[in-house]
Amino acid sequence: MTVGVIARLKIQEGKNEEFETIFAELVAAVRENEAGNNFYALHKADSTNYVVLEQYVDQAALDAHGQTDYFKSIGARLGGCMAGRPEVEYLEGV
């Protein structure tokens, strides 16, 4: 059963370009390396709020995503742009 993820990210004012550049690296790594990921896309809600829409073929694929070296290292770099913790919602595919 697929697993959907909606992650809401609030970034610091003026960090858009840096955030989007770093996040693009993460998107490319996910698409290149994760056969269990159906989609991984960043959307801009307004000047400081972004939404990431993700879908995985199953829970194991989602778990594997969070354990990748690139997710951990790029995620740490994104931390310098953040204005708070991400709000993450998990959804069960039907």
Image (spheres, rainbow, N blue to C red):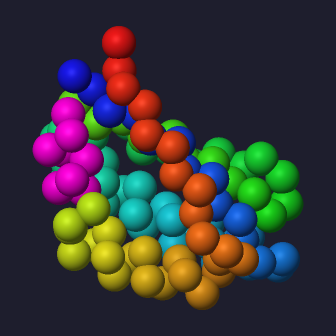
**47, above or below 21, in the image:** above
Residue beneath the point at 55% across and 81% down: 79
Relative to 71, is 44 on the left or the right?
Answer: right
Does the stretch in magenta take in 59? Answer: yes
Residue beneath the point at 21% across and 40% down: 59
Query: Where's residue 84, x and y in %?
Result: 67, 74
State the residue in front, 28 or 44.
44
Does the stretch in magenta take in 8? Answer: no
Residues drawn in magenta: 58-65
User: For the C terminus, which image quadrant?
Assistant: top left
Question: Magenta: predominant secondary structure element?
Answer: helix
Residue beneath the point at 43% across and 83% down: 76
Query: Where's residue 1, x and y in %?
Result: 22, 22
Query: Where's residue 88, x and y in %?
Result: 52, 51
Residue beneath the point at 41% across and 55% down: 27
Quarter location, residue 69: bottom left
**32, above or below 5, in the image:** below
Residue 32 at least partly seen? no
Q: Residue furthest top?
A: 94
